[in-house]
Image: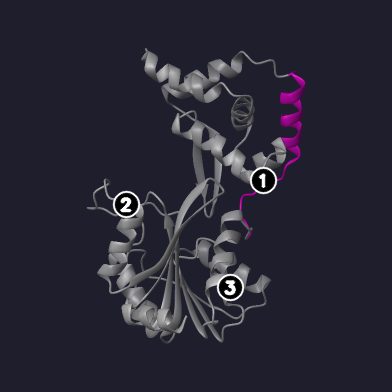
């Protein structure tokens, strides 16, 4: 049996027209935020907010495939039984629901068997293109969960990317080919650190390092941050993209995510210049830019 408090939480989440339509769609097919926004003719941020409410109530669940997140009805839980019972009461010939279903069936799936562009990736790319000023000559990407951000280094003399899987390497090569961009793609020995062998394969020291672990639970390990810092020249800049709620093992969850990120960067000798949150594709990401303290001081003096 379900406690009344839990049942009320499910009812509050489902008792809204758009969210009821989302439940019906996600029961029929796994769909991304972009797919659902097109079917409902609503903006992606609005659909993301509704999906977050449904996810927090355990009525839908997120399914990750590479850089993409799809949504489906929760499975194997009491909440799943509630959703199935609720949807069983719907008249599926109802014109709005029938129209949604027909549009969803005509909507091509966004699974990235080949490389695809995500809205979050576009947001992260825009951050880099705005903040990489002046343009760095040598750029290293680590993780690269959104391959389109490689385009931010299209005018750099040297570009390298350290990735953690064959699939990620294939996506990175596809992104570089799309931009007609020369970039050295290296599959690393492991995801917890940067070995000397990894860095040697990537090339020389870099003016900019971009760590994209925006979909990873737990954030960037300290050893990886230290390796990235070591790859920077003295005047270099580092950008880090990670999940807002990421908490590395051993770190208290009571610490605010922004304060935690500042402290972790400081532990490897970097000082934050800016941290901003970004929300897209149902993801909440912190974007941090950092440099060595003396570099920050010089930048502030020269404006």
Q: Which residue is mark 2?
A: 247
Q: Quick check: is 105 in the magenta stretch?
A: yes
Circle 2 crowding by C-alpha within 10 Å: few under 14, some 14–19, many from 20:
many
Relative to 112, 81 lies left or right: left
Camera-nearest label, 1 or 2 = 2
- Residue 174 image offset from top left, x and y in percent: 62, 68
Residue name at image x 52 percent, y 61 percent: 167
In three-dimensional space, the C-alpha distance between marks 3 and 2, rounded to whole angstroms, equals 28 Å
Mark closest to the chain's N terminus, 3 or 2: 3
Closest to the observer, 115 or 7: 7
Q: Is residue 100 visible?
A: yes
Q: Which residue is mark 3?
A: 152
Q: Quadrant of residue 173?
A: bottom right
Q: Which residue is mark 1?
A: 109
In three-dimensional space, the C-alpha distance between marks 3 and 1, rounded to whole angstroms, equals 27 Å
Instruction: Provide the residue span drawn in magenta.
Output: 93-114
């Amino acid at each position: 049996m379900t406690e009344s408090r839990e049942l009320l939480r499910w009812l509050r989440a489902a008792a809204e027209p758009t969210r009821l339509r989302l439940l019906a769609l996600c029961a029929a097919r796994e769909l991304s935020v972009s797919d659902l926004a097109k079917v409902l003719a609503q903006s992606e941020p609005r659909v993301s907010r509704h999906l977050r409410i449904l996810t927090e109530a355990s009525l839908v669940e997120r399914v990750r495939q590479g850089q993409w997140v799809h949504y489906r009805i929760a499975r194997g839980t009491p909440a799943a039984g509630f959703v199935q019972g609720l949807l069983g009461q719907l008249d599926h010939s109802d014109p709005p629901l029938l129209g949604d279903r027909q549009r969803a069936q005509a909507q091509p799936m966004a699974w990235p068997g080949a490389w695809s562009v995500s809205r979050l990736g576009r947001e992260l790319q825009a951050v880099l293109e705005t903040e990489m000023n002046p343009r760095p000559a040598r750029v290293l990407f680590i993780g690269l969960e959104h391959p389109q951000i490689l385009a931010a280094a299209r005018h750099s003399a040297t570009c390298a990317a350290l990735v953690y899987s064959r699939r990620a390497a294939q996506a990175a090569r596809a992104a570089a080919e799309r931009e007609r961009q020369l970039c050295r793609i290296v599959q690393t020995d492991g995801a917890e650190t940067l070995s000397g062998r990894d860095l040697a394969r990537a090339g020389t020291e870099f003016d900019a390092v971009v760590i994209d672990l925006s979909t990873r639970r737990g954030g960037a390990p300290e050893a990886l941050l230290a390796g990235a810092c070591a790859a920077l020249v003295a005047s270099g800049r580092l950008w880090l993209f990670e999940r807002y709620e990421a908490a590395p093992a051993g770190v208290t969850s009571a610490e605010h995510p922004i304060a935690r990120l500042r402290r972790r960067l400081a532990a490897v000798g970097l000082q934050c210049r800016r941290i901003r949150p970004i929300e897209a594709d149902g993801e909440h990401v912190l974007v941090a830019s950092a440099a060595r303290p003396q570099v920050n001081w010089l930048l502030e003096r020269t404006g």
